[in-house]
Amino acid sequence: MESADVIARELQRRFGASSAAFLIADFSGKSLVRMGAASQDDSLSPKSERIALFGSVYGEAIRSQQCRIIPGEEGGAPRIIAPVTNRGDAIGLLELTLAEEPGEEALQEMCADLGVMAHVLAYVVIANERFTDLYHWGRRTRPLSLAAEIQHQLLPRSLACEAAQFAVAGAFEPAESIGGDTFDYVLDRHHLHLSVTDAMGHHVDAALIASLLVGALRGARRADVSLTEQARQADLALAAHGRGAFSTGQLLRVDLRDGQAHIINAGHPLPLRVRGSVVEQILLEVDLPFGMPFPHTYTAQSLELLPGDRLVMFTDGMLEHAAHDLDLTTLLEGTRGDHPREAAFTLTRAVLDANGGSLEDDATLMVLDWYGPHLTQRDAVGGADTSHASPPAR
């Protein structure tokens, strides 16, 4: 935390703040954890205070990716918060406690400077989390089982990513018994790769199958083989493991130069596409799941993506629980204007709520917004705002 401590003290010096704190978003996307506060007589240290996101000014700051000011109550000190975000990954917030509420012009300047420092902090967290468990501690609302620990390590380092051509985000809501779900993405020079998989079984057995599958897919992808060869190698890995191990899944590859997309559907629920105000199921040929013990092949099918489209890939845990209380199409319509990271959390949270807060199977999905292969004016460095001049909100 020493590097975050340095940033906190610099913020105090620059703005005359009485304290500075870093609030990290937890894995669930439902709350922030106040990692500590640097004040004039207190060093930055981890603390366990949690702040709910939904319905709060903190949640609005993350959702809007804009600076917010929180007026002091009953003469108390005002606070100013700014999003700590890198390429669409909402890591958390920077919070300053001020000596007095600034005027409008001073607030504008303060938000601009604080935004730069928050972006620097995002890089600090990304660089330092390789060497410490402190940030992992902050992101956990509850202890993880061994199976859950394995599956969390299979997820991409960042749950969201921005580029000029797209925005993508995933969400994973684990079942009590862990059901083997994973999602993954990677961006290379010319392609975006996405995958969603659902391994058979529960507990550690499912997590180990998922680990084998993700390892095979990543190894094949990094060897720069075709999409069908990636599927074949994943299939062979599970078949060689034996013991009836299999997994459904979808593999997607999008060419960033021309927008051409291809998808393989290995026994998985069909994806949904939102185009304008219309939500439609994408009809695909369904190949066999990975690991089936008899000869079969995989077909990479063309998938049309037009600028403005939203694609949603998900596991069956999004469908089979309390389905009579959950209308996925209506939810997609209602979240159409949200960033993919917000839409993903809203959708998985709806499934969890529909099941009384406890799932029998993992609920996992990925949300991809496609903007087109052409160069755009989108700022994909921080929160992907289209303008740098958004005014701070009070």
Image: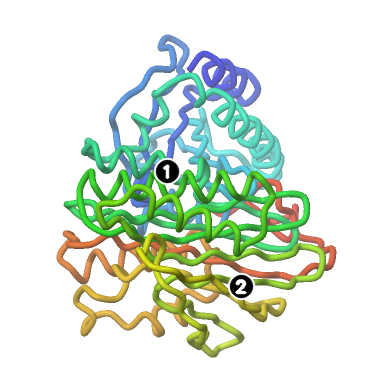
The image shows residue 153 at horizontal and vertical percentages of 40, 39
The residue at which mark 2 appears reads as: 300
In this rendering, the answer to whether 18 lies above or below 336 is: above
User: Is any atom of residue 2 visible in this view?
Assistant: yes
Tell which of 297 and 7 is nearer to you. Answer: 297
The residue at 49%/35% (across/down) is 95
The residue at which mark 1 appears reads as: 154
Tag nearer the camera, 1 or 2 = 2
Q: Amino acid at mark 2?
A: Ala
**Left or right of 163 in this view: 369:** left
User: Is any atom of residue 61 visible in this view?
Assistant: no
The image shows residue 53 at horizontal and vertical percentages of 37, 51
Q: Amino acid at mark 1?
A: Leu
Tell which of 163 and 59 is nearer to you. Answer: 163
Distance between mark 1 and mark 2 Cα atoms: 24 Å
Pick whichever of labels 1 and 2 is earlier in the sequence: 1
Please give the label number shown on residue 99: none
**Left or right of 346 in this view: 280:** right
Tell which of 271 and 243 is nearer to you. Answer: 243
Q: Secondary structure at mark 1?
A: helix
The image shows residue 354 at horizontal and vertical percentages of 21, 71
Q: Residue furthest right?
A: 375
The residue at 36%/22% (across/down) is 46
In this rendering, the answer to whether 218 lies above or below 132 is: below
Tell me which corner region of the image, top left, top right, bottom left or bottom right, holds residue 114: top right
Q: Secondary structure at mark 2?
A: loop
Tell which of 232 and 85 is nearer to you. Answer: 232
Circle 1 packing at 10 Å, graded few (<14), some (14-19), many (20+), is many
In this rendering, the answer to whether 332 lies above or below 117 is: below
